[in-house]
Image (cartoon, helix red, strand yellow):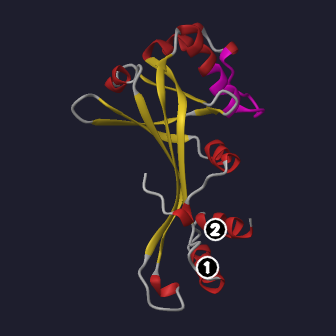
């Protein structure tokens, strides 16, 4: 990914926080003829530097995953930034956050897939009332896992870019944030917090 220096994010803690906050990503592989992409929730295990997920067995992409270096793309909020918000003439642009993760993918065995599905439920169901737990599901429901293929990605590289009008002076930056807030754009809050850090 092309990353201008002023938008580059190098701090691992900042990247890790982003991955935990934005767990829905796009997995890209290649079938020898063309790229293939699937949009999935992923669990990030920073201790082991891994991502885990699963896709439908009917999805042919899983056949391209084993032992391949894959790309997983994560996006945060994004928004159009009008040049009319600057104190001088310039071009309009787009602000966004994106993280690319590269790694080697391996298919999970049945025991690992059960652990992945149980962990996914535990993580996202949390302590909500009537939380769904793998352990309490009926056998017919559990058997639906036969329709998915799980895999893990051992991370080899991460690249992150947060384009948040860092190149603008304080007055223009504040005006951009204010205009985005008027439009209820979530990236406005990200920009405000990032400028203070």
* Percent coordinates x, y for residue 142 in the rendering: 56, 12
- Asked whether residue 119 is drawn in magenta, I would say yes
Badge 2 element: helix
- The image quarter containing residue 8 is bottom right
Q: Which badge, 1 or 2, is on the more N-terminal residue?
A: 1
Q: Residue at coordinates 69% horizontally, 13% vertically from top-left?
A: 135
Residue that extends furthest to the bottom in the rendered view of this protein: 88
Q: Residue at coordinates 57% horizontally, 79% vertically from top-left?
A: 168
- Asked whether residue 156 is drawn in magenta, I would say no
Say if 6 sits above or below 70 in the image.
Answer: below
Residue that extends furthest to the left in the rendered view of this protein: 33
* Percent coordinates x, y for residue 127 in the rendering: 78, 32
Which span of residues is magenta-colored?
117-134
Q: Residue at coordinates 70% horizontally, 26% vertically from top-left?
A: 122
In the image, taking residue 148 as reference, residue 77 lies left or right, namely right
Badge 1 element: helix
Marks 1 & 2, CB-CB < 8 Å contact: yes
- The image quarter containing residue 51 is top right
Of residues 123 and 112, the one drawn nearer to the viewer in this rendering: 112
* Percent coordinates x, y for residue 52 in the rendering: 56, 27
* Percent coordinates x, y for residue 49 in the rendering: 62, 31
**Badge 1: how crowded within 10 Å, few (<14), some, or many (20+)?**
many
**Badge 2: how crowded within 10 Å, few (<14), some, or many (20+)?**
many
Q: Mark number for residue 133? A: none
Say if 118 sits above or below 170 in the image.
Answer: above
Say if 84 sits above or below 108 in the image.
Answer: below
Q: Residue at coordinates 55% horizontally, 32% vertically from top-left?
A: 155
Q: Which residue is mark 2?
A: 191
User: Which of the image's four quarters has the C terminus?
Assistant: bottom right
Residue that extends furthest to the front in the rendered view of this protein: 5
Q: CA distance from mark 1 to mark 2?
A: 9 Å
Q: Which residue is mark 1?
A: 173
């Amino acid at each position: 990914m092309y990353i201008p220096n002023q938008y580059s994010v190098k701090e691992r803690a900042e990247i890790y926080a982003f991955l935990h906050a934005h767990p829905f990503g796009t997995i890209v592989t290649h079938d020898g003829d063309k790229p293939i992409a699937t949009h999935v929730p992923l669990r990030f295990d920073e201790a082991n530097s891994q991502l885990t997920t699963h896709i439908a067995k009917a999805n042919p992409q899983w056949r391209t995953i084993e032992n391949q270096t894959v790309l997983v793309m994560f996006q945060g909020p994004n928004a159009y930034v009008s040049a009319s918000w600057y104190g001088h003439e310039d071009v309009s642009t787009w602000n966004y956050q994106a993280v690319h993760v590269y790694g080697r993918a391996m298919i999970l065995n049945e025991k690992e897939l059960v652990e992945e599905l149980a962990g996914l439920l535990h993580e996202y169901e949390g302590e909500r009332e009537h939380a769904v737990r793998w352990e309490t599901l009926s056998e017919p429901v559990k058997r639906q896992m036969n329709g998915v293929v799980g895999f893990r990605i051992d991370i080899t590289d991460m690249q992150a870019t947060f384009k948040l009008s860092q190149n603008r002076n304080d007055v223009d930056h504040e005006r951009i944030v204010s205009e985005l807030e008027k439009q209820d754009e979530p990236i406005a809050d990200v920009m405000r917090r990032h400028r203070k850090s």
